[in-house]
Each structure stands twice: as structure tokens, then as C-alpha cells.
Image (cartoon, rainbow, N blue to C red):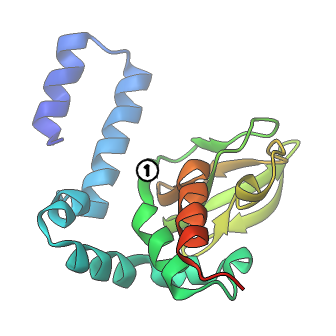
Amino acid sequence: MPTSVCSEFIRFHKLPEQLTHKIRNYVEFAFSVTKGINVDSIAEQLPKHLQLEMHLHLNRKMVEQVRIFAGCPRAFIRALVVKLQPNICVTGDYVVCSGEKGNRMYFIRRGVAEVMIAERVINTLREGDYFGEIALLSNQRRSADVRAVTDCMLLTLSLADFEAVLEVCKRSSPPL
């Protein structure tokens, strides 16, 4: 959304200053990351094989580094890469909160986030790191908070998409 449209939206709805600041930060960061280019809208115009090549080029390495995906067939990795969805968080946003039910994992494409337990930082995550993969394997609640230290561009993999890929791979694999 161009800044002029954003400003008009804010004025029209008479949004409070704190919310206005958050919205402007989000819009400015989203534009700085994408330069106004919507990768998904471009991908949708491409034939399926080019969509796959593009997604593999952009995201394959991030998916392959996840320990729970080590040794998985290439077709599985390819299917997961296509399911990744962009998600932007601005500085101070909580990406996940301790105690909530997990239903997705996250990859940090750009930015820095902190993993916190009881408001104590236990780990710092940077570009290329991932978190929340336990949500794909078990029905456990989140064990920590993750907060954006800087504006972050994340990619997410939902539990539903992960299970769908598993099912397709299971059906297409030859019996042992």
C-alpha cells in the first residue's frame, strides 16, 4: 500500500497516534523488503514449473537446514517450499506467545528476534534461523515467547500445509 493511500486511510478512520505509528512502520518496512513487488502475484502468472523453480531458488536452503527435515526426499522439500507464506512483524511484535497452541513454524528471512522465557532472553535468532518446528510434530503449547527485535520478514509453514504435504508424499511413495 503506497504511503499516500496509507495516510489517507489513517486520516479517514481517525486512528490514534500509537496505532498510526505501527501501521506506518509496517507499511514502510513491507515496502523496503519488497520494493513494492508482490512475489506471489508474479508467481501466479508463471507456469507451475517456473513457480516451483522460483520458490526453490528463494527458499530451499532455509527448509533443508531444518533438522526434522534432514534426509527427507527432494519431492517433500520441494512441496514444502511452495507452501511457505510471507509474514511481516515490526519491532516489538510478539510472533508467538508462551502457552498458546502452536500451528505453524517460522523462518527468519530478514531481521532479528529474541526467544524469551519469563521475560528473560534465552536466544537471539537472525536471518536464516527458524523456530516453532515442534508445532508441526506435537500438540504441545508454545514453551517460549518470540519477539521481533527489529522489523522482520518471516516465512511461515502452517501445520495444515505440513500435514497436506506429508499426506501427498505418503500417497505418492511406493510401498516398501
On the image, numbered disc 1 is attached to which residue?
88
The reply, left or right, for residue 171 in relation to residue 152 is right
Q: Secondary structure at mark 1?
A: strand
Which quadrant of the structure image shows residue 69? bottom right
User: Which residue is located at x 71 percent, y 61 percent?
Assistant: 133
Depth check, front residue: 44 or 1: 44
**Dividing the image into 4 quarters, which one contains the N terminus?**
top left
**Dividing the image into 4 quarters, which one contains the C terminus?**
bottom right
Q: Position of residue 98 (x, y in %)?
A: 80, 40
The reply, left or right, for residue 68 in relation to residue 122 is left
Judged from this view, the residue extending furthest toward the front is: 175
Q: Position of residue 114 (x, y in %)?
A: 70, 57
Q: Residues within 10 Å of mark 1 (few under 14, many from 20)?
A: many
User: Which residue is located at x 31 percent, y 52 percent?
Assistant: 30
**Up-down relation of residue 173 to residue 157 (above or below):** below
User: Which residue is located at x 15 percent, y 72 percent?
Assistant: 47
User: Which residue is located at x 25 percent, y 73 percent?
Assistant: 51
